[in-house]
Image (spheres, grey):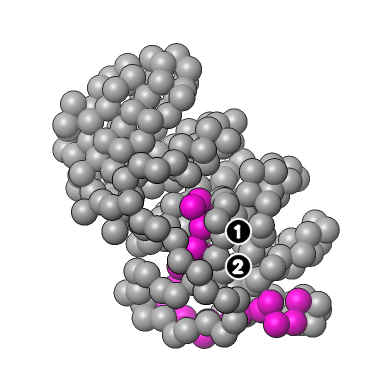
Amino acid sequence: MAKNAGLFHVEIGECPKHSSQSRVTRPIVHSDAPLTLVGGGVTGAHDLGESLALAPRLVGADGGGDVALAAGYRPEAVIGDLDSLSQEARDTLGPAVHRIAEQETTDFDKALRSIAAPVVIAVGMTGGRFDHDLAALNVLVRHAQRRCVLLGSESLVFLAPPELPLPLDASETVSLFPMGPCRAESEGLLWPLGGLELSPWGRVATSNSATGPVTVRVDGPRLLVILGRSRLREVVEALSGPGPRWD
């Protein structure tokens, strides 16, 4: 079921305990504008700067706190199990460091579910290891109510909301990958979806092509959208809009 979800305010402070099946938790950080989340994975030379230009508030996921400090940025919070964050970073950031001890979820999961923002741009969460990449995609689906864009070296990926218009140009590559069974419709794709049933073990919709502006509609929080990273600004603006959201 989709809804227009409002945001709510909590003070930055001690984080609550979370179960492995947690979908919505009380946030540690609240932002009324898009926010950047940096992890300890592969981060391109311009990733943080590009993301912060669109989402100027910065949070680190565990070792991402060190990545931020090394790049000259001070995150307002670092969230994770803290098995990767250096002692130097802990001393520098002090009370901005929030430990979630459970080991059933990744630091990306812990951080994302602890942030309330219209959109989160996540950098340093992919690249280098397939298992890390797959775990990051799993987080997008587990926390469908948190709109998040994963920024990679050449592309970006996010979970499609119930309906999303995208201002694309003709011939741009549009890839759609189902993380579970779903039905999707589209406008503006060279090969329309037309209510097709998609699934990871059946039909997928990668390497499609835009004929102009594209709209995608999907019946459940299962469909990943993959675009070139040059569309980061347009994607953030589209996801920040008032359209329907997943519960």
Q: Residues within 10 Å of mark 1 (few under 14, many from 20)?
A: many
| Residue positioned 41% across, 20% down in the render | 213
| Residue positioned 55% across, 65% down in the render | 30
- In the image, residue 28 sits, relative to residue 124, either above or below, namely below
Image quadrant assignment for residue 62? bottom right
Alpha-carbon span between mark 2 and mark 1: 7 Å
- The residue nearer to you, when weighing 20 against 126, is 20
Q: Is residue 94 magenta?
A: yes
Q: Position of residue 143 (x, y in %)?
A: 38, 61
Which residue is tagged 2?
61
- In the image, residue 97 sits, relative to residue 203, either above or below, namely below
Which residue is tagged 1?
37
Image disc number at residue 102? none
Secondary structure type for disc 1:
strand
Secondary structure type for disc 2:
strand
| Residue positioned 50% across, 69% down in the render | 9
- In the image, residue 209 sits, relative to residue 61, either above or below, namely above
Drawn side of residue 51 relative to residue 201, left or right: right
Q: Position of residue 187 (x, y in %)?
A: 29, 22
